[in-house]
Image (cartoon, rainbow, N blue to C red):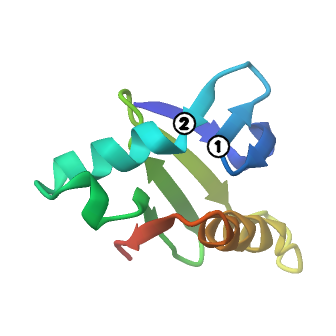
Amino acid sequence: MKEYNYKSIKKFDKFGIEFKDGYIINFIECRMNWADSRKINYTDSVCVADRFFSIGNSYFIFYTNERVKIIFTKSIFPWNTKHRKKFLEIQIGLNRYGYSSYDCS
């Protein structure tokens, strides 16, 4: 499984997520793989990832052919909530583009 910190995201749009190293998460591929992993029809779901939210360490696991984990780690500074805001941006963005993530928290 590949792992990225959320700070490595270069671009996030309706097609997927591109990282600074050039790796791309394709949402259509993720949707097909997620449905296949749950043994359901591709047309019956719009999920592309599993999501885990906790106070200290939150992440998404996207269902690319090689799973990709995007980590949103808590800052050492108690007033810094940037990781939570970025996590919500991804979650809301997925919904805006017609996709969803499955809550595994």
Could you tell me how many numbered marks the image carries?
Answer: 2
Q: Nearer the viewer, residue 58 or 35?
A: 35
Camera-nearest residue between 21 and 26: 26
Q: Give the residue displayed 38% in from the left and 27% down from the top.
A: 66
Front-most of 11 and 8? 11
Where's residue 68, x and y in %?
47, 37
The picture places residue 50, in percent across and down from the top left corner, at 39, 61
Quadrant including the N terminus: top left
Tell me the residue that label 1 is attached to: 15
Q: Is residue 5 left or right of residue 61?
A: right
Which element is circle 2 on?
strand
Residue 45 is situated, as x and y percent measured from the top left of the image, at 32, 65
Q: Quadrant of the C terminus?
A: bottom left
Q: Are marks 2 and 1 in contact (CB under 8 Å)?
A: yes
Position of 43 compared to 41: left or right? right
Q: Residue furthest front?
A: 43
Going from N to C along the chain, the mark reached first, 2 or 1, is 1
The residue tagged with tag 1: helix, strand or loop? loop
Q: Residue at x 71, y 48 (%)?
A: 6
| Residue at screen point 30% across, 42% down | 33
Of the residues shown, which amino acid type is indicated by label 2? Asn
Give the amino acid type for the residue marked by disc 1 in the picture.
Phe
Tell me the residue at 47%/42% (across/down): 28
Q: CA distance from mark 2 to mark 1?
A: 6 Å
Task: List the residue tagged with mark 2.
Answer: 26
